[in-house]
Amino acid sequence: MTLESRIELIADKVRSWLESLDSSLQEAAEKTVKEDYFNQSDVIYAIQCLRQSVTLDKLKKWAQKGKVKDHGKNPQKVLCLHAGNLPLVGFQDALAALISGHHYFGKISRKDPYLLPDFLSRFEDTPLYAKMQWNTTLNHFQDLNADAVTFSGSESSIPSVMQAIKEHNIAKANARYLIRKAHFSIAYFDAFNDVNSKNLVNAILRYDGKGCRSVAIVVSPVTLAQIRCSFTDYFEAFWMHHPTYRKPTPKITYRSAYDKAVGKTHMLLEHLIIEEADDPKLDEDHIIYWVEGDVQKMIELANKYGDQVQNVYVPSMSIPVEGYEDRKAPLSEAQCPPIDWKPDGMDILGWLDELGE
Amino acid sequence: MNELEKRIFAPSLSFEQKALEVYRYQIQNNAIYQRFCSALRVPDTLDDINEIPLLSIEAFKDATVKTGSWENPELLFQSSGTSGMSRSRHYVRSAELYRQSIQQGFRNFYDLDQFIFWGYTPGYAQNPHSSLIWMINELIRYDSSQLSRFLPLQKPLNRKDSKEIRDSGKQLMIFGAAFGLIDLVEISDVRLPENTIIMETGGMKTYKREMSRQELHQKLSAGFGLPLQNIHSEYGMTELLSQAYARGTEWFETPPWSKITIHDPENPMRIQVDGEEGLIGIMDLANLYSCSFLLTGDAGVRRKDGSFQVLGRWKKTNLRGCNFLIDQD
């Protein structure tokens, strides 16, 4: 099978998977919601984003951009350890492995056990000429001897993952690893208007703010105090359409009391809090920091946090963000990235293409 | 000292009695603490000290923490930090109150009159806003032998000084930050009296190096040629006017007007059971004119007898972002 025919086949499978209303996808989505892995709004949103971003044309462009070669004749074993913080968060890695022609082995997250397997099962009887296996337990991949492993992790989680891979003899000693560490994004909010506000609220609240593309720092010439009241309407509107059942945690209640005590401007958003800050510490996942400043200030903060930063968002791509051209993205796409986006600045398809060379 | 100040140190009153009295005083006279308790819906009068909310110690960076309507503090302590970093500022209304806390606190664990103090730290003149150096300076001033002093930095200890200590019949205590003491060991070649106590004051982590307290103590013990039990630690901070001491073990003890509790990082109002790790909370009644009820960012664990270990800064996990976790994913 040629690369082109493989891409055509995959695009066709993705389209039929995403579009057929009576499909198993609907069942997988319902189970995901019913069993409380994710809320309905987030699951639908994730599926809708894939509908927009995965088309034959876009897949072809992705492969062309990276000058991807066909590895169907010399496939390597690729193990993808999929995280489960958002619905279908591992989709891009799995799709890239299939396109590349390598053998795909997927450790499915126990926190998102239905959606990705439902997609993968579409290929069970398809002649991709590569092996495919997936499972929710790591032990399943005992003695796999993988040539390559991909996963995302914080510095503190990496040693335990590496240890488990070694213990179960999952990867070869010289296996290549793609470890992505970025865990939050920064947004520049140049002016308060309807479009900007809706996009920013989505970038903050979507997926309960748990994605690495979620905004944890907002840099704006407008102060939080200036727009707090008007902004409240946008948050309420978001929740009206995408209800969340998260209540403020004791930690949030404590933090809000603290902010009130010291006179710090803040907004309590159910389970998150937006807080005005000069120098965000970013040591609490439930706090979104609002920093007064311009694009230069955003660059300073991005420099400070380095590879922890996934993306820097701008309301308009015409706004220059020097040094961050690769990580600059439109605020409107914060939670709905194109299929060829590069987590941690690395094109997964390009990385897989280099395997076995 | 006024009556309320004296009561803090009065041995006839229980800690609980004094803490509840200070709580009432501070909630009525400290606007920040009042707003904090009000937002948490904690009443002005309590019967149980475990219900007293602990204010995050960050408040000393974000605001002026003051109880009462006084102006002109007698002392101002500031945390160290590089330019651009926000620093804690502790306005101290009464220097005498801090002096009493230092002296009485020290007496609680050591024989104050028996000691000669050396401080291997920058001197008071160079660091007037360091609460630690003010404390060492006070201890030096207290000693009438004239042998207590700040040591010049980067200069080795000399034999003559050591001999003078021996001749005085008193006991030597050397205060210093972790890596300062390591440096002193490396440049000195002198035998100290064997009952010398080395008092490390923290700072196990610098921009250059990091080591555990246990490892540090072993190095100091070997380097100074002193038994391990002579390597002690002091736990204090800019925001506190009382100190805890660990005397040759890893367990710190507090003076009777101070108490440690360990709090659930996910619910700072919840006190952990003894033996469980969490954030170190401190009730320091000597902080009468700032805030006595504070939650630190340090990790710790407590024993039933009230002693505690400091386990470094609380390490927060990054829940935001794709993070593959073996036991969850």
Image: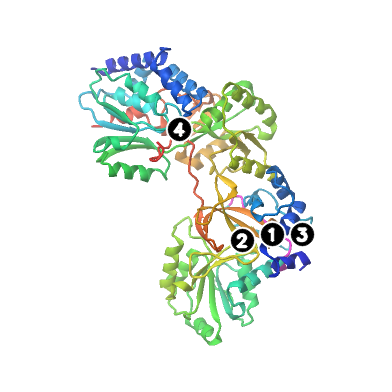
Amino acid at the residue labelled 4: Asn
- Horizontal and vertical percent for residue B60? 65, 52
* Contact, mark 4 vs mark 3 (Cβ under 8 Å): no
Amino acid at the residue labelled 3: Asn
Discs 4/1, front: 1
Q: Which mark is residue B72?
A: 3
The single residue placed furthest to the left in the displayed view is A73
- Looking at the rendering, the stretch of residues picked out in magenta corresponds to B83-96
Q: Residues within 10 Å of mark 1 (few under 14, many from 20)?
A: many
* Contact, mark 2 vs mark 3 (Cβ under 8 Å): no
Q: Residues within 10 Å of mark 2 (few under 14, many from 20)?
A: many
Q: Which mark is residue B19?
A: 1
Instruction: Indicate which disc, 2 or 1, sits on the residue closer to the N terminus.
Output: 1
Placement of A250 over or under B12, stated as above or below: above
Instruction: Indicate which disc, 1 or 3, sits on the residue closer to the N terminus.
Output: 1
Between residue B200 and residue A186, name the one nearer to us.
B200
* Contact, mark 2 vs mark 1 (Cβ under 8 Å): yes
Residue shown at 64% from the left, 60% from the top: B240
Q: Which mark is residue B259?
A: 2
Labels 2 and 3 in the same subunit: yes
- Horizontal and vertical percent for residue A138? 32, 37
Labels 1 and 3 in the same subunit: yes
Q: Is residue B72 visible?
A: yes
Helix, strand or loop under label 1: helix
Q: Which residue is mark 4?
A: A85
